[in-house]
Amino acid sequence: MARSLNVTRRKLLIILTFLFAVWVVINKPGRFGIHRFGFTVYSAIPFPYVDLKIHTNGWPSLREKSHYVAYEEIQDLLKEDPEVIVIGIGYANVVRVDEKILEIRDPRIEVLNTSEAIKRFNELKSRGVKVAAIIHSTC
């Protein structure tokens, strides 16, 4: 009985290890993975119904849920000297961006719907570009 329990535990551990490995392959560290309205995975960490700020060093932080990106909100990202800041304005493009942000020429500011912003962030990151992002996970 004890031996069959150990075999069962071992099989369960193998299955869980396999599933974890698949999860990490799909949701690579330092990149966005699975994303749908209200659910975003970044660096293999699921973030349901929150908005994210991704710093140039790859660390995510939560941003206050808002339909407006204020100039003050990107000040810390600007200090990190990114080449590009990608802003995801929601799946239905509901988020407004402060005009001061849109006037910035260095770094380049790219404002896209969230799905496209996530793709663009991953593309830039894979090319070695120093990129930061603000991602709105809904709307």
Image (cartoon, helix red, strand yellow):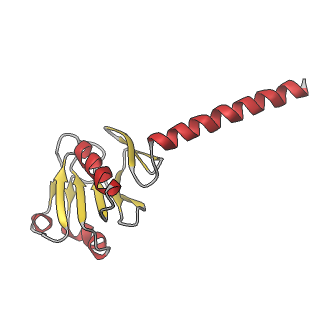
Extreme-front residue of the structure: 127
Front residue of 28/112: it is 28
Q: Position of residue 137 (x, y in %)?
A: 31, 46
At x 53%, y 37%, the residue is 22
Q: Quadrant of residue 91?
A: top left
- How many numbered tags mark residues here? 0
Q: Quadrant of residue 6?
A: top right
Q: Position of residue 5 (x, y in %)?
A: 83, 27
Q: Position of residue 127 (x, y in %)?
A: 31, 57
At x 32%, y 73%, the residue is 80
At x 65%, y 31%, the residue is 15
Quadrant showing the N terminus:
top right
Q: Position of residue 85 (x, y in %)?
A: 24, 62
Front residue of 122/16: it is 122
Front residue of 65/17: it is 17
At x 45%, y 44%, the residue is 27
Quadrant showing the C terminus:
top left
Front residue of 5/96: it is 5
Extreme-bottom residue of the structure: 79
Say above or below: 121 vs 106: above
